[in-house]
Amino acid sequence: MQRFHYATGAAIAMAAAGPLFLIPIAFSVGPMAFLAIPLAIPIGAVIAAIPVIVGGFLMGSLGTQHDATRKPFAWGGAGALLALAIARIFDAIPDPLFTGGFIFTGICCALIVRYGTRWDEDLAE
């Protein structure tokens, strides 16, 4: 059975989630949004923890069986779908700014996790 490792990418993605969420918001309200970064890091990490861990595990598992699911496009799409689900949970769907923030963050976090994911054959090289 092939294995994969994604903890490093997942940890970075969780730490980055809050600040990433602020980027689209800063386009709307201005750069003052970045003053919230010290609060955004821990709050974003808590909100992102389950989707990052579960999504990374599922995509890593799929990658052991199907090479196509290792592609960044597949990971970004999965991140966008999970982000839409989270936006729905937080009732952000009616607000395009927050929905966009969730989607942007989901895609970026998924790509960060993918960048840090290695399968056994990657480690053997």
Image (cartoon, rainbow, N blue to C red):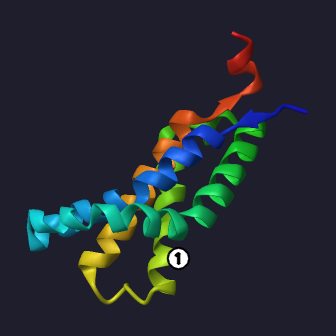
Q: 71 left or right of 4? A: left
Tell how many labels.
1
Mark 1 is on which residue type? Ala
**x then y, percent, for residue 96:** 26, 79
Q: Quadrant of residue 7?
A: top right
| Circle 1 crowding by C-alpha within 10 Å: few under 14, some 14–19, many from 20 | some
Name the residue beneath numbered marker 1.
Answer: 85
Q: Is residue 115 visible?
A: yes
**x then y, percent, for residue 107:** 42, 55
Q: Quadrant of the N terminus?
A: top right
Q: 8 left or right of 42? A: right
Relative vertical location of residue 115 with respect to residue 57 in this rendering, above or below: above
Relative vertical location of residue 125 with respect to residue 66 in this rendering, above or below: above
Most extreme residue toward the front is 38
Residue closer to the observer: 103 or 51: 51
Residue at 58% in and 47% down:
10
Kindly state the secondary structure of the residue where label 1 is placed: helix
Q: Is residue 82 visible?
A: no
Most extreme residue toward the right is 1
Residue at 50% in and 76% down:
86
**x then y, percent, for residue 30:** 8, 67
Q: 28 left or right of 11? A: left
Relative vertical location of residue 15 with respect to residue 48 in this rendering, above or below: above
